[in-house]
Amino acid sequence: MTETELLLDELDRRILNALQEDASQTNNELAAKVHASPPTCLRRVKRLIDAGVIARQVALVAPDKVGAGLTAIVEITLDHQAAEKMTEFEALVANEPAVLQCYRVSPGPDFVLVVQVADMPAYHALAHRLFASHANVRNVRSFFSMHRSKFETRIAL
């Protein structure tokens, strides 16, 4: 266990599992679900937030319901992999709202991105803006989702 990891007991795990299922529930609903008193539950959740275990609470939006129906998984290989070049590319994609996730990976490409856009013309515009016009991008390999069979944000505890 690293120094930054928090020791989680069974109650913490029940709280985290319940919040991963539905973070919009009230503290009283959460406390009843995890079999704890509301003050204990509130204190535990605050501790988990303060420790960074709960990074943030968000609403999951259905992409096809908001005009963002095309998912692309994109592999990027850079010409130069010096640390500052990798960081520069990460900063470039971090500022692009259509890039939902960015991973440095090894072996293989340098980065794998998950991109959500409206359609193929929107992807083409993004690819030109981020990849074709960036001098350090050597190779781009894109895969387009035909069907999403699983999408989960839950971490198994």
Image (cartoon, rainbow, N blue to C red):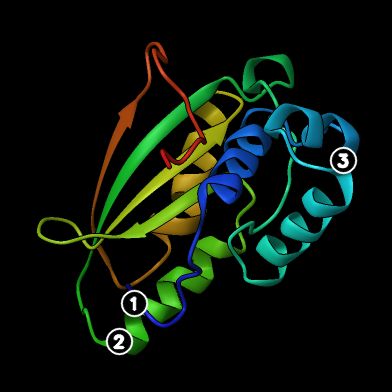
User: Is the residue under label 2 in contact with that under label 3 (CB below 8 Å)?
Assistant: no
Mark-to-mark CA distance, 1 and 3 = 42 Å
Task: Identify the amino acid type marked 2.
Answer: Ala
Mark-to-mark CA distance, 1 and 2 = 5 Å
| Residue at image coords 66%, 61% | 48
Locate residue 43 relative to residue 63 in the image: left or right. right
- Residue lying at the far left in this picture: please name it: 107
First of labels 1, 3 by sequence position: 3
Q: How many marks?
A: 3
Q: Quadrant of the C terminus?
A: top left
Q: Position of residue 110 (x, y in %)?
A: 23, 63
32 or 83, which lies in front?
32
Residue that label 3 marks = 27
108 or 79, which lies in front?
108
As drawn, 123 above or below 45: above
Residue that label 1 marks = 86
| Residue at image coords 63%, 25% | 68
Locate residue 115 relative to residue 53 in the image: left or right. left
Q: Quadrant of residue 80?
A: bottom left
Element type where label 2 sits in the image:
helix
Task: Identify the amino acid type marked 1.
Answer: Met
Q: Which mark is residue 83?
A: 2
Q: Position of residue 125 (x, y in %)?
A: 53, 42
Q: 10 Å neighbourhood of mark 3: few (<14), some, or many (≥20)? A: some
Q: Quadrant of the N terminus?
A: bottom left
